[in-house]
Amino acid sequence: MDDLVNCYYMIKSKKLSLFIVFLFFISSCFVIIFHAFGGRMNTYPSSLFLLVYMFIPLLSTFIVQKIIYKQEIKKTVNISFRVSLWWILPCIIPIFTTFSIIILSTMLPGVTFSPDMTGFFERMSGVLSETEILKMKYQFETASMHPFWITLLSGILFGATFNAIAAFGEESGWRGFLLRELSFYSFIKASIIIGIIWGLWHAPIILLGYNYPEHRIFGVFMMILNCVLLSPIFSYISVKTKSVIPVSILHGCFNGTAILPLMMLKGGDSFLVGYTGLTGAISYLLIDICIYLSDRRLFAKSVCRSI
């Protein structure tokens, strides 16, 4: 019996190692090629680059699970469309995150609430041309509804549909393959390991200037912290729904609404404010605490007893 258990863990360990090797090898090669051809972040080509980049965890899962081990992929990735009340949370959590980040950010020195979006236009000055900014200001002034509410509604709508498809490329690896392969660990330990891998996977694009253009080195560590704190939230949704689909929706909604706090804040930089800043990390920690207080036993229970 012990030999069978040891064999099981050896297979798990080898599959995990292969996944990590393919994940970081493919990602690094892709970033090097993009950079070698003059690719830069915050440009239109970079949007396509990042979209393709999101599917690398799925590609790595496919290579390990289907090509090397010749095993079925649907069950491993945890694909299920069985809808329950838990599916509502992916649309609610980003809304809470947005407002909590705005409130927390205004407590920081030099950061103020800016409903006229002057802070947002200042941030965009380094990304968009003067003509594009003037066009945005005109649209803001003539809009029948504040752009914040329009972006919130569209962010949730597109986040739960089109964005979720791209997010599935990531989540099939994180809350699909990895969560199942780490199922012999406790929920919290598996979530932390996934969060570290998830954060490190962002390192190559962060070093190119994504998310933290002013703090490329320290931005890697901030991203790891954010991913570690986000991971229990995403894993919790996956465990409760027994599916990676609602987690993909949550991920898509996060991507769709990430710009919202920046629209309403003036001051601060990418390291402090926003979904990937310090205030984002605090917001995720608050949600983690709520999950822990409402379901303490899950945190200590092995994942295999939950999925």
Image (spheres, rainbow, N blue to C red):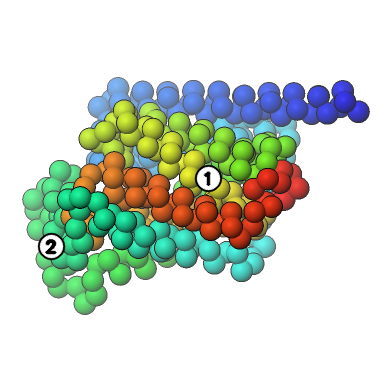
- Marks 1 and 2 sit apart, C-alpha to C-alpha, by 37 Å
Q: Is residue 209 left or right of residue 158?
A: left
Label located before the other in sequence (1 or 2):
2
Q: Compared to 283, does 220 lie above or below? A: above
Image quadrant of residue 191?
Answer: top right
Q: Compared to 53, does 129 lie above or below? A: below
Residue name at image x 47 percent, y 61 percent = 93
Q: Nearer the viewer, residue 89 or 192?
A: 192
Asked if one can make out residue 124 in the rendered structure from this viewpoint, the answer is: no
Q: Is residue 126 left or right of residue 153?
A: left
Q: Compared to 303, does 114 lie above or below? A: below
Within-10-Å neighbours for mark 1: few <14, some 14–19, many 20+: many
Q: Nearer the viewer, residue 285 or 142?
A: 285
Residue name at image x 64 percent, y 54 percent = 296
Instruction: Look at mark 2 in the image and give the residue it sits on.
Output: 137
**Residue 11, position as x, y percentages in the image:** 74, 26
Image quadrant of residue 199?
Answer: top left
Q: Nearer the viewer, residue 72 or 199?
A: 199
Give the residue type that dot 1 points to.
Ser
Asked if one can make out residue 38 in the rendered structure from this viewpoint, the answer is: yes
1 or 2: mark nearer the eye: 1
Image quadrant of residue 68?
Answer: top right
- Check residue 231 in the rendering and tell me which mark sits there, or answer none: 1
**Label 2 residue SS:** helix
**Residue 1, position as x, y percentages in the image:** 91, 28
Give the residue type that dot 2 points to.
Lys
Residue name at image x 57 percent, y 35 percent = 193
Extreme-bottom residue of the structure: 144
Residue name at image x 41 percent, y 27 percent = 30
Within-10-Å neighbours for mark 2: few <14, some 14–19, many 20+: some
